[in-house]
Amino acid sequence: MSKHVVARAAEIPPGGRKLVTVRGRPIAVFNLGGEFFGLLNRCPHEGGPMCEGVLTGLIEADVPGQYRYSRVGEVLRCPWHGWEFDIRTGRSWCDPEKVGLRNYPVEVAPGARVAEGPYVAETIPVRIEDDYVVVVL
Ligand code: FES
C-alpha cells in the first residue's frame, strides 16, 4: 500500500472535489463536510466522468406520496446516464453486490508528517503549515 499526496487540503473545501491522477489512475476526490472520499473517475456503465457527477441524497418512501430525504450529498450520480453510487463505499444503488466504483481511502495529513520519510540526511529546518490530502492505493 502506498500513499500519494494529491493536494493541499484547502484546495478541496467542504462540498468540493478534485480530479487527480495517481499512478495512471484517474481518481475523483470529494470533500463531504470534512470527510474525504476517493472514487475511480470511470463509471462502470460506459466510463462516465464521476468527478462531474451530481451529489444528491437518498429518497425513500414506504407509501406513495410520503417521502424521506436522507444522506444528503452521499449519493453520486453519473453525469452521463444517471447511475447512482454510495460515495462512502462506491457501491451502486441498483445492484450493490455486482456493480460499483473502485474506492480509495483518503486521509488528511499534517504537512509535517507528510514531509517525514524513512531516510535521514543532513537537514535544514523547514516548517510546513498546511494539511495535505493523501490517497492510499
Ligand atoms: S456512463 Fe455512467 S451511467 Fe452510463
Image (cartoon, rainbow, N blue to C red):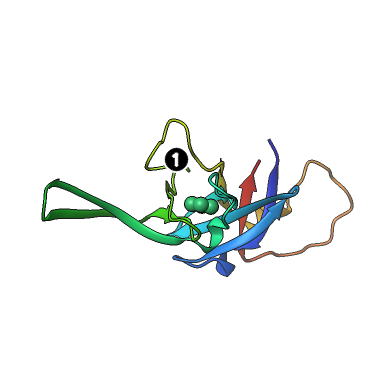
The quadrant of the image that shows the C terminus is top right
Name the residue at 43% across, 42% down: 92
Q: Is residue 125 left or right of residue 112?
A: right
- Quadrant of the rendered structure where residue 108 is? bottom right
Q: Is 13 in front, or is 92?
A: 92
At which x and y percent is residue 40?
59, 48
Tag 1: residue type? Arg
At which x and y percent is residue 94?
37, 41
At which x and y percent is residue 84?
41, 50
- Quadrant of the rendered structure where residue 51 is? bottom right
Q: Residues within 10 Å of mark 1 (few under 14, many from 20)?
A: many
What number of labels is visible?
Answer: 1
Instruction: Tell me: residue 100, above or below residue 18.
Output: above
- Secondary structure beneath disc 1? loop
> Does the beta carbon at disc 1 come under 8 Å from ligand 1?
no
Name the residue at 58% across, 56% down: 28
- The residue identified by callout 1 is 91
The residue positioned farthest toward the top in the image shown? 97
Q: Is 133 in front, or is 77?
A: 77
At which x and y percent is residue 14?
45, 65
Name the residue at 62% across, 65% down: 130
The quadrant of the image that shows the N terminus is top right
Name the residue at 49% across, 40% down: 100
Q: Residue 33: in sight, yes or no?
A: no
Q: Is residue 24 left or right of residue 59?
A: right
Q: Residue 56: in sight, yes or no?
A: yes
